[in-house]
Amino acid sequence: MTYTDDFTLPTELVEQIAEQGFEYLPEMIRILVNTAMQIERQKHLGAATYERSPNRRGYANGYKPKTVKTRLGEIAFDVPQVRDGSFYPGALEKGLRSERALTVTLAEMYVQGVSTRKVKAITEQLCGTAISSSHVSRATAQLDEVLEAWRQRPLGEIRYLYLDARYEKVRIDGQVRDAAILIASGVSPDGMRQILGVSVSLDEHEVHWRTFLQSLVARGLSGVWLIISDAHSGLRAARQAIFGGIPWQRCQFHLQQNAQAYVPRKDMQREVAQDLRKVFNAPDLATAQTWLKEMVEEYRPKSARLADWLEQNVPEGLTVFSFPISHRRRIRTTNLLERVNQEIRRRTRVVRIFPNEASCLRLISAILMEISEDWQTGRMYLSFEGSEERVASSPS
């Protein structure tokens, strides 16, 4: 086919379309785009192929094949080249923008928890060609720059800091191991929630926690009134090292669960749970401490082990009484992060085993960034009006 500025649809192409209908569309697109790129090169050079002209600004240098995935399937184009490399056809660039849009869509599907198998089936229906799992992985990798910027964004004053950990299966050196996912969330002075940070690592617990907490401080985290968390292994030492002067509220929900491991008989479990809830729902700290003392005395004859555990651990769940009454219900547990973990679990269930730590961090960061943005446009979580000063200091 001859390329000219006054290009018209060739008769043979019209006949092919008439005979084969839409099945011939990919070939038609290939010919049309190739023609458009050839015309672009002629205009760029100021002369047609082999034309002698005083306006010539360079020389053609053949063609380079490029296969592009489109909604019509894979199409192989012949991209015109010039000797000095100063030309790239706008016609193909527009097509590549569509390809990049597809790539972003693939990444979004993955982030939303669609399995690579389903992604493959969907793209095969839409594009006429299957997208491999490796292509989906490459697509999600394009999110890395945005996600890294979000993870490293500056922080400011946070009144209540929630910390939690969960685990995901990650394949490392041919072995499937449990990677710890550390998540920090907080409530700012304007009463809005936000996800502050996330970290994925196989490192020793205390080292991982310490590094993670140090990164929050380095990003400007300040003004913390209270830290709320479970008694995670390694977190206590790291928290004391980085936030030694800040009170700690041990999650009351997890305390009730932990207590069940020390109940000697199954028929006592409900009774112990009810007694603990009574302590936690006390009107003030003095009453809670009195009821806890009575509870310990009641259970010591039945189980000295349970009584000792209650005496040593439950006070860590009473720090909340030193804070505004209107805030207590939402700062006595890590339920804020438990709901976040449920959403992460829903999205990661389809993955089951991540191929590496980077892919795990990528997906969970994307989920958390989405949740945090939703929070910022949602309702106020807590009101700090009239609560700028903490109530009393935390119990010892």
Image (cartoon, helix red, strand yellow):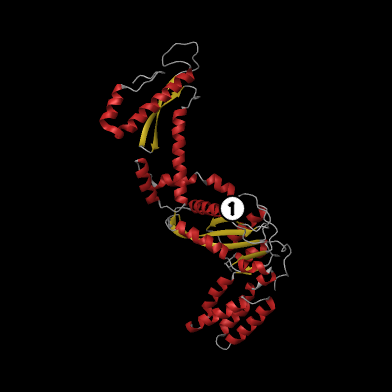
> Mark 1 is on which residue type?
Thr
Seen in the image, is 69 located left or right of residue 382? Answer: left
For the residue pair 191 and 45, the one nearer the viewer reads as: 191
**Location of residue 288 (image quadrant):** bottom right
Quadrant assignment for the C terminus: bottom right
Q: Is residue 97 left or right of residue 28?
A: right
Q: Residues within 10 Å of mark 1 (few under 14, many from 20)?
A: few
Compare residues 339 and 355 and report the one nearer the observer.
Answer: 339
| Residue 369, x across and y down, in percent | 55, 52
Q: Do we see residue 178 in this rendering?
A: no
Per the image, label 1 sits on a secondary structure element best described as: loop
- Residue drawn at x 56%, y 53% as measured from the top left: 374
- Residue at numbered disc 1: 377
Q: Quadrant of residue 73?
A: top left
- Residue drawn 62% across and 80% down? 311
- Give the x, y percent position of residue 376: 60, 53
